[in-house]
């Protein structure tokens, strides 16, 4: 994993190696979270194609939900117009990927912040 220095994995098959990579990344990101650090966003495959350390292997994609490693949650109190909040709640109830109103706000914040990082 060229974006994560010192993070290694192995497997007897490609599928085992990908599972090992996911496990290694999870452990690494958990460690970063405990240290109060956030993971660096991965570069694209194209960014690494010219790197001589990244030749002779197989490229694979490991999907990691980084939101699990953002640290502890904090409760906050916000004020929104009543009808806007009702629309948000209706939307969240029909889009299970958000799980909750808080999940909806967090995902929208992540998307907006990723545009500026």
Image: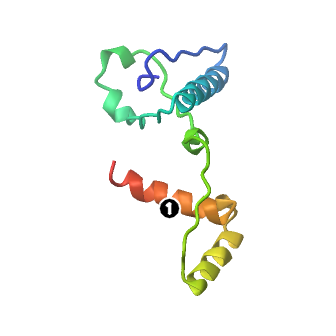
Residue 83 in which image quadrant = bottom right
Task: Please state the horizontal and vertical placement of residue 55, each as a whole percent of the image.
Answer: 38, 17
Image position of 79 with respect to 6: above or below: below
Q: Answer left or right for 32 relative to 51.
A: right
How many numbered marks have been drawn onto this rendered protein structure?
A: 1
User: In the rendering, at what x and y percent does residue 117 appear?
Assistant: 34, 47
Relative height, residue 95 to residue 80 (above, below): above
Q: Can you name the residue that lies furthest to the left here?
A: 50
Q: Left or right: where does residue 56 sit relative to residue 17?
A: left
Vertically, is 33 above or below 66? above
Residue 30 or residue 73, whichever sits in front:
73
Q: Nearer the viewer, residue 8 or 105?
A: 105
Res 15 quadrant in image? top right
Give the residue displayed 47% in from the left and 22% down from the top.
Answer: 1
Q: Residue at x 42, y 15 (%)?
A: 56
Q: Position of residue 80 (x, y in %)?
A: 54, 78
The colour scheme used to paint the residues is rainbow
Residue 32, above or below 115? above
Residue 75 falls in image quadrant: bottom right
Taking the spot 34% from the left edge, 34% from the top edge, the residue there is 46
Quick one: label 1, few (<14), some, or many (20+) residues within 10 Å? few
Which residue lies under the disc numbered 1? 108
Q: Secondary structure at mark 1?
A: helix
Q: Residue at x 48, y 27 (%)?
A: 59
Question: Relative to the observer, which residue lies in front, 113 or 13?
Answer: 113
């Amino acid at each position: 994993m060229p974006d994560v220095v010192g993070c290694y994995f192995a497997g007897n098959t490609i599928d085992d190696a990908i599972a090992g990579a996911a496990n290694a990344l999870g452990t690494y990101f958990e460690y970063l979270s405990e240290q109060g650090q956030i993971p660096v966003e991965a570069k694209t495959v194209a960014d690494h194609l010219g790197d001589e350390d990244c030749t002779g292997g197989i490229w694979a994609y490991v999907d990691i939900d980084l939101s699990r490693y953002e640290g502890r949650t904090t409760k906050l109190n916000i004020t929104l117009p009543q009808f806007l909040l009702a629309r948000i709640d209706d939307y969240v109830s029909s889009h299970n990927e958000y799980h909750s109103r808080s999940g909806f706000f967090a995902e929208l914040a992540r998307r907006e912040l990723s545009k500026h990082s």
